[in-house]
Image (tube, rainbow, N blue to C red):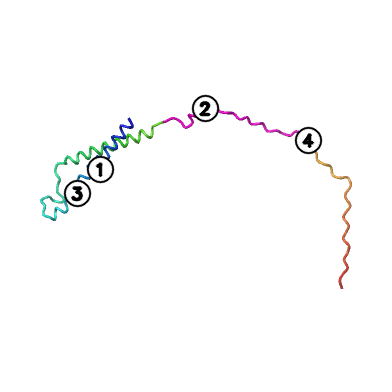
């Protein structure tokens, strides 16, 4: 179905390019106005030519295929990326945290206080 829509879309887009290039623009009448043509610049065009009807139909088909392709591509589900991963996943055991239950011993302060350091010898004064 998608392939058929893509082929139709490409063919209609090429046909639409050709059919638009074959039409003459509204500005083509301006040159003819100054040349003495009987057609007026702001006058009515009359019945819609066959080329305009074909262009309208091609544009409607082009828009329909564009919307259809956009809808199909947005809702297309191809599965999951994880489809090739085996269902059984390896379980890595995590060891429980260990708690050291040995009592903490704090060393007792020494019973005797240390001797104060000797004062530095006095230096002779310079006279």
Q: Helix, strand, or loop for circle 1?
A: helix
Q: Which residue is label 2 attached to?
A: 86
Residue at the extreme top: 88
Q: Which residue is label 1 attached to?
A: 17
Q: Are marks 2 and 4 in contact (CB under 8 Å)?
A: no
Image point (59%, 28%), residue name: 91
Quadrant assignment, res 93: top right
Eye-nearest disc, 3 or 4: 3
Q: Position of residue 16 (x, y in %)?
A: 25, 41
Q: Is residue 11 magenta?
A: no
Eye-nearest disc, 4 or 1: 1
Q: Earlier in the sequence, mark 3 or mark 4?
A: 3
User: Left of 54 or right of it: where is 76?
Assistant: right
Residue 26: which disc? 3
What's the magenta bit mostly, secondary-structure-wise?
loop
Q: Position of residue 25 (x, y in %)?
A: 20, 48
Q: Which residue is label 4 attached to?
A: 103
Q: Earlier in the sequence, mark 3 or mark 2?
A: 3
Image point (23%, 42%), residue name: 18
Eye-nearest disc, 3 or 1: 1
- Neighbourhood count class around disc 2 (C-alpha, 10 Å): few under 14, some 14–19, many 20 upward: few
The magenta segment: 78-103
Q: Earlier in the sequence, mark 4 or mark 1?
A: 1
Q: Earlier in the sequence, mark 2 or mark 4?
A: 2
Q: Are marks 3 and 2 in contact (CB under 8 Å)?
A: no
């Amino acid at each position: 179905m998608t392939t058929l829509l893509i082929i139709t879309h490409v063919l209609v887009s090429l046909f639409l390019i050709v059919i638009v290039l074959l039409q003459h623009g509204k500005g083509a009448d301006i040159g003819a106005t100054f040349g003495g043509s009987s057609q007026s610049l702001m006058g009515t065009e009359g019945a819609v030519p066959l080329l305009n009807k074909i262009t309208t139909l091609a544009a409607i088909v082009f828009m329909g295929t564009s919307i259809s392709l956009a809808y199909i591509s947005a809702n297309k589900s191809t599965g999951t990326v994880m489809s090739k991963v085996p269902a059984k996943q390896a379980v890595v055991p995590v060891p429980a945290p260990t708690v050291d239950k040995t009592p903490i011993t704090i060393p007792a302060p020494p019973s005797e206080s240390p001797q104060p350091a000797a004062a530095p010898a006095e230096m002779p004064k310079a006279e």
